[in-house]
Amino acid sequence: MTRHELFAQIQQKQSYLCIGLDSDITKIPKHLLEYDDPIYEFNKQIIDATKDLCVAYKPNLAFYEAEGLKGWQALEKTIHYIPEEHFIIADAKRGDIGNTSKLYAKAFFNTLNADAVTVAPYMGEDSVTPFLGFPGKWVILLALTSNPGSKNFQFLYQENGQSLYENVINTAIKWGTPDEMMFVVGATHPEKFQEIRALAPDYFFLVPGVGAQGGELKEISKYGMNEHCGLLVNSSRSIIFASDGEDFAEKAHAAALEIQQEMAEILKNKFPS
């Protein structure tokens, strides 16, 4: 999917919502455990209930890898089930030496047919660039994450006077263009969005941390948007686990609709017709 196509979907759906499919088998409604593939059944019903309200889905690989072969089969079926117009992010947080990264890229882009994969930059350029160069595919590079431990390393200042996350962004924009690279910027750091947007004015940001982690949509939208919206705001638990009963899909729809309606108002003010 190109940047133009992604922005077109945002405009059409009046949404920049990404729904995280963190499909923990210990948390899905108990009645689904009767199915041969409960994780897939859960995902399918979540997708059916929310597909008109979001532009992206983000399966977190850990919840599938933990289930072994059955988990991988559920992941593959889920990705095939997601409607074509949606942006699919494999949240794998990979990053290794060049030949290994190349195989990771083939796994997610060619075998699973995801549109994007999250990548950790710690090992540097030769661990990131093998993910680039796949037409219509994206690297989403960890920059400033939403977890409390982000402060352990990401805010450390380097010899040039910049923090580590600033150095990651300033260095990585030399590797990939805004048509093939995005950055993870956590919603739990709203005070940083304006300066990060100045560092990467044309790039999309994947923004975790809205919802269960407490990030505020209006604030990050105010300081993080660019002329192509430039934001994919992820919400996982607060949508997919809005209920643990038989009404889970209905409750997921309601939770996603609430966010989408707020996004529609923000977009209307940002891009008046």
Image: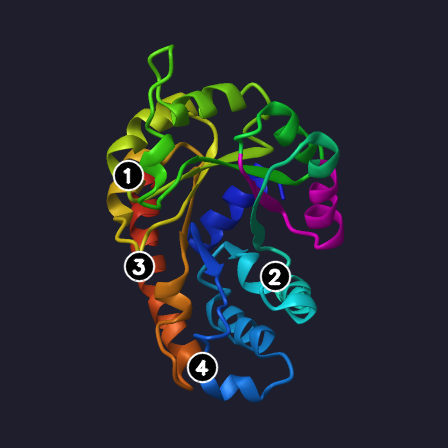
Judging from the image, what secondary structure is the residue with disc 1 in?
loop
Judging from the image, what secondary structure is the residue with disc 2 in?
helix
Q: Position of residue 61 (x, y in %)?
A: 57, 56
Q: Earlier in the sequence, mark 1 or mark 2?
A: 2
Q: Which residue is mark 2?
A: 65
Q: Is residue 55 left or right of residue 69?
A: left
The span picked out in magenta is 102-120
User: Is residue 135 in sight in this rendering?
Assistant: no
The kind of residue on which mark 4 rests is Pro
Q: Residue furthest top?
A: 160
Q: CA distance from mark 4 to mark 3?
A: 19 Å
Q: Which residue is mark 4?
A: 29
Q: Is residue 116 magenta?
A: yes
**The C terminus appears in which quarter of the rendering?**
top left
User: Is residue 125 in sight in this rendering?
Assistant: yes
Judging from the image, what secondary structure is the residue with disc 3 in?
loop
Q: Earlier in the sequence, mark 1 or mark 4?
A: 4
Q: Position of residue 109 (x, y in %)?
A: 70, 47
Q: Residue at x 70, y 68 (%)?
A: 69
Instruction: Determine which of the numbered discs, if any, sits on residue 189 in the image.
Output: 1
Q: CA distance from mark 1 to mark 3?
A: 15 Å
